[in-house]
Amino acid sequence: MKRIQGWGNTATDYPVPEPAQKYLKNVVGEPAQLTNASIENLIKKIPPASCPAHPLISTDPEERLRHARGQSLNDWVDLCDGLIDSFPDGVAYPVSKEQVRELIAYARKNDVVLIPYGGGSSVVGHLTPVQQEKASISVDMSRMDQLLDLNEENLEATFAAGVSGPQIEEALQKRGYILGHFPQSWEYSTLGGWIVTRSVGQQSYHYGRIEPLFVSGHMETPAGPLDLLNVPKSAAGPDLRHIILGSEARLGILTDATVRIRRLPEEERFYSAFFPNFETGVEAVRKIAQEELPLSMVRLSDPMETETTFQLSGEEKLVSIAKKGLNLFGQKDERCMLIYGLTGRKADNRLADRHLGNIVRSHNGMLVKFYLGNAWIEKRFLTPYLRNTLWDLGYALDTLETSLPWSKLQEGRTAIVKAIEMGLEHENEKVLVFSHVSHVYTNGGSMYVTYLYRRSHDPQQTLSRWRILKTAASQTIVDLGGTISHQHGVGLDHKTYLSQEKGTLGMHLITDLIKTADPSQIMNQGKLVDLDK
Ligand SMILES: Cc1cc2nc3c(=O)[nH]c(=O)nc-3n(C[C@H](O)[C@H](O)[C@H](O)COP(=O)(O)OP(=O)(O)OC[C@H]3O[C@@H](n4cnc5c(N)ncnc54)[C@H](O)[C@@H]3O)c2cc1C
């Protein structure tokens, strides 16, 4: 069963081993002993539903609680520490586009806000009901999860938009195909959510981000249905797919989507390499990206992420041997770990691996062909469960991300990490910050930052610490000219920074689009942008 407080299902845990707990205490201090608010008490906070009754809408309190938030740190404090103060008034589970249309008609008639709910994995506040004076309905898409069409000639598949990552791959892989979109939230996130938030899977270098995978689809908007033409490419004016991509439910509800698929690869391999410091590692990764080596992924951790990965692995003996070995080969305290993936034909993989090896060696790097790459792939959907354990131990953990051109990436990382590290100095609180470069392009890459700090006995203080850190990092990002999000989207948490990225006219264009598709403003109000009525 899916957790109400925390990430994932209740059957899965990721323990933090004793030595790792010691390491965290050394870095950020002794954590406070805290317990979560009880579900019973959270349910007691739910006011009576204020939406008019409808046969498709359930007002069951637990359902309303389950759909009230996503996975941003703010959401965690609301749900785990009991600060939550807004809930959808009801939850609907449509099974067809006709039912989606019916819900939109209901919402228009009764001036009720609709908040589509995919997998609930948003980390930027996409799902919070914000209009207390208007009732809101969470539209859970999970019953729209079918494979509607598989076109083997065109290598395309059409799914209902509520289909989850595992359901997609199950449907495709047994027929010899793969979508290959693997965000770390894959276990619970959905195709519709990926498209409207512009998500990126871990092997984006081979399979592509969601943008090139999304071919066409059907959206129900309050102004009527929108169908995209399915052609390989069109020069007929602006591309309407790019209006749906990143629309964050402000235009309507995506009911189905056609995606490009591939034949299952002959081989997938994951290996690792080490560089003596981050600067050399980034240079090597830039070279790899600019030589367009046919890899499926690269992920270069900074020294702190490399060390924290070792510490949290729980493999004390193995880590100690590995460190000795790495030291001998010049990979000392500033060492940075690269995980890379090869996906495709065996012969092509071998060639790509040989080229990569040459680049690694010419940057004083060292290849490690055993254990680490496989360990990473095995745990890639398990590591988010660490956040649950860390939370229970008394630590709050959050992530943020941006993308920057190569010319600014190193400076950018230093500035963002410093802004977070120093963010709680006024409280004498330490913050553990680490980062990695992952999705890479010929002109730059994404920078993904994780930070961990101590929760407070006062949930408001836990929240205010997060706000300070998030604001410091976000302001640094926009000051650097980076994007406020490479992959997580805007939601509530990044809304303030959007105009700096889009400019005045850009913001008008976005708001006018929303007003056209949703003239009575019933779609996910308050997210992405604020509109004047
Ligand atoms: C542990 C963890 C790891 C993550 N890793 C990644 C990662 O590797 N890469 C990445 O890009 N992101 C990642 N994310 C962020 C998140 O998973 C993505 O933003 C994802 O695309 C959200 O999909 P979802 O189905 O869960 O959508 P939800 O969280 O349910 O909703 C997100 C937004 O989409 C809207 N929406 C959902 N379905 C529809 C629909 N059918 N029509 C219209 N609007 C809809 C919602 O209203 C909301 O505004 C991660 C999150 C977590 C918690």
Image (spheres, helix red, strand yellow):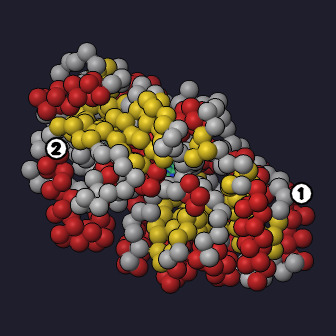
Q: Is mark 1 within 8 Å of ligand 1?
A: no
SS of the residue at dot 1? helix
- Quarter of the figure with the N terminus: top right
- Residue 255 in the image: above or below residue 301: above
* Number of the label disc, if any, that sits on residue 317: 1
Which residue is depicted at the point 73% across and 50% down?
267
- Asked whether the viewer can see residue 101, the reply is yes
Q: Depth check: 127 or 141 in front?
A: 141
Q: Amino acid at mark 1?
A: Lys
Instruction: Residue at the far front: name it.
Output: 153
10 Å crowding of disc 2: few (<14), some (14-19), many (20+): some
SS of the residue at dot 2? loop
Q: Amino acid at mark 2?
A: Asp
- Residue 71: horizontal and vertical position, in percent? 46, 45
Whole-Å distance between the Cαs marked 2 and 1?
Answer: 59 Å
Q: Is mark 2 within 8 Å of ligand 1?
A: no
Judging by the rendered image, the residue that carries numbered circle 2 is: 518
- Residue 322: horizontal and vertical position, in percent? 87, 65
Left or right side of 60 for 155: right
Q: Quadrant of residue 60?
A: top left
Left or right side of 271 for 218: left
Cβ–Cβ below 8 Å for labels 2 and 1? no
- Mark sitting earlier along the chain (2/1): 1
- Residue 160: horizontal and vertical position, in percent? 41, 32
- Residue 471 in the image: above or below residue 379: below
